[in-house]
Image: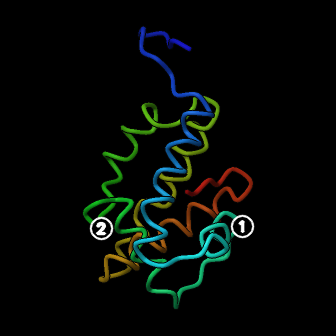
Amino acid sequence: MMDKNGDWDVTRQQFEQSLAMMRNGCAPKFKLTTEQIDGLRLGNFDENNKDLKACFIILTKKGELSAQKALAQIPMILPVEMQEIALASLEHCKDIQKNYKDSCDRLFFTTKCVYEYAPDDFTFP
């Protein structure tokens, strides 16, 4: 579907395919089970699982979350129906990472905050 600027919107199917690609890249590298990754979708954040935390680093490439860049990318990577809650949850959680020195912890707890902000709308690879 084309948006008001003449750009193509991401469909839910395209978004789900992107999540599957991220999952398939992360899980084998850190020997994570489907259950561990699926657990995140249900709010099961195991703070002691370093492999799971390391997976977050892979998903962001540099181990840092630039809230400004992430907020700017939301319209390009999420279906329209997910954008409003994604923007609100990221805006709400963007400063959580300042509480942690370790890059794994920064991303882990930011993601956990996003989940807690809107658990019914949370999506993770």
Q: Residues within 10 Å of mark 1 (few under 14, many from 20)?
A: some
Q: Position of residue 73 (x, y in %)?
A: 38, 38
Q: Quarter of the image containing the N terminus? A: top right
Query: Where is 48 relative to 84, above or below?
Result: below
Residue 23 placement, left or right of 60: right
**Along the viewing direction, whichever of 32 and 117 lies nearer the viewer:** 32
For residue 124, what is the image quadrant?
A: bottom right
Residue located at (56% from left, 36% from top): 83
| Rendering quarter of residue 44 | bottom right
The amino acid marked with disc number 2 is Gly
Secondary element at tag 1: loop
The circle on residue 42 is 1
Residue 61 higher or lower than 55, as above or below: above
Label located before the other in sequence (2 or 1): 1
Camera-side residue of 96 and 13: 13
Measure how far apart labels 2 and 1 are at the Cα level. Answer: 23 Å
